[in-house]
Image (spheres, coloured by chain):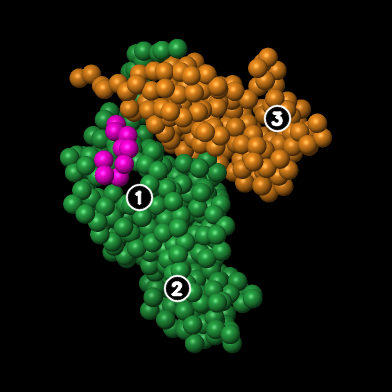
Amino acid sequence: MSETLYTIAVEVNGKRHSGQVPARLSLVDWLREELRLTGTHIGCEHGICGACSVMLDEEPVRACLMYAVQASGHRVTTVEGLAKPDGSLSVLQDSFCETHGLQCGYCTPGMLIASQALLNSNPDPTEAQIRDAIGGNLCRCTGYQQIVEAVQLAAERTRTK
Amino acid sequence: MLYHTASLPDSELKAAPFEYARAASLAEACALLATHGDSARILAGGQSLVPMMAMRLLRPAWLIDINEIAALKFVCVEKDVARVGACTRQCVVERDTALAARLPLLRQALAWVGHVQTRNRGTIGGSLAHADPSAELPLVAQVLGARMLLRSSKGARTLDAEMFFAGPMATSARADECLEEIHWPVWSEKRVGSAFTEISVRHGDFAMAAAAAQIALDGDGRCVRAAFGLGGAGGTPLAFPKIAARLIGTRLDDAVVEDAAHAAATETEPGGDLHASAQYRRHLAGVLAARALREARERAGRP
């Protein structure tokens, strides 16, 4: 029995993409398997780890907890959309490198999306606010301290720019 | 660019196949429910439903998506009730300062609900309809006696929280009904205080036990109204109106609070799992109920 396919149109990182998807295809699977935007990682696939975080209409959400068909008509920003158009790293990405805010890198795309969303709405967050913003993202390498430092550094650099 | 999905092989997709309908209006959602009934599920924020489908604990034949229905997204604070549309995102309610001024318990509870990413997507009605006995919003609904407005193609009816929550992950809503609005009572007393607290493995995870309390004091500091309840301590969120009634007329001294909390915990029948035994959960229930009541008292005490 063939499965119904649904036509979708989603703006991803500023570019319009269309596709035909089965309803049960998750947004993160569509981004990775169809658009080949493999920067967004799949961890637990049930909303615990935060590795698949993307921005949906500017707000961070878990891309494993929605179906691609639901994103139709909306805007999505993935980790690939954070870098500058020439491919150089954003202030936040550069700060992660500088403070050693990553080790294996698995959680990093989700951490970047979560902390960029925080900085977009709050350019001068407290440490507690940073910890709250990344509270839904698991990292098994860094112990989080350097990630918090990266966000603090990015905030400072953005303010003094 | 147009992609033709050679859909991933079945073994690589987590959920079982289903048909999808994006409802443009509540009437359309109700019509779809009337047609598909038992084999359909409403898809609101999906923060609980989608993982359950990924684990194939649920295999609905249809998902009726209500996320694009603007009429289900609103917060309206009236004199003694706050009306909230069922598909209002949790983050929207969390940020609503006018609502928080009249009904602080909702914001206090939302601080414990999931994480930023899940509150951005999760809805108020979705959490209530999911009816997880350890979840925060159902507990607040039970404690305050919120009323659920349910809509079907045949009409509408309202159910008190007490009637609405039927068991673990079960409500009294019929298969053809969609939650439309939630009516949260707003207390009009001058000195009202409320508090929410819980214990979980990680902040934002499922609560091992949770407690919510709201009390009102008169000018003398005597309790004139009290409500409190426990989550994660039974098959539904629990409220204790009889025990709360015993608090009225007292000054909510620590001893009175401890007695009430202990009495409530004794009535609970929590389950146990590898994170916490039933005995430990009952202990937590008593400790948390006392904490919530004391904190609510302190907040009401402040002018």
Direction from residue B149 to residue A102 in the image, left or right: right
Name the mark on residue A92.
Answer: 3
Please give the name of the residue rendered at 17% of the width and 40% of the height, measured from the top-left corner. Answer: B35
Same chain, labels 3 and 2: no
Please give the name of the residue rendered at 31% of the width and 37% of the height, measured from the top-left corner. Answer: B23
Whether the residues at callouts 2 and 1 have beta carbons within 8 Å, the answer is no
Residue interval drawn in magenta: B20-28
Q: Is residue A132 visible?
A: yes
Query: In what element is the residue under mark 1?
Result: helix
Which residue is labeled 2 in the image?
B227
Residue A33, image x, y percentages: 44, 17
Query: In what element is the residue under mark 3?
Result: helix
Question: Alpha-carbon neighbours of circle 2 within 10 Å: few (<14), some, or many (≥20)?
Answer: many
Mark 2–mark 1 distance (CA, rounded to whole Å): 23 Å
Same chain, labels 3 and 1: no
Whether the residues at callouts 3 and 1 have beta carbons within 8 Å, the answer is no
Name the mark on residue B160.
Answer: none
B21 inside magenta stretch = yes
Q: State which chain is coloured orange.
A: A
Q: State which chain is coloured green.
A: B
Question: Alpha-carbon neighbours of circle 3 within 10 Å: few (<14), some, or many (≥20)?
Answer: many
Which residue is labeled 1 in the image?
B130
User: Which amino acid does the dot numbered 3 rest on?
Assistant: Leu
Residue B87, image x, y percentages: 40, 47
User: Which amino acid does the dot numbered 1 rest on?
Assistant: His
Q: Is residue B237 above or below residue B264?
A: above
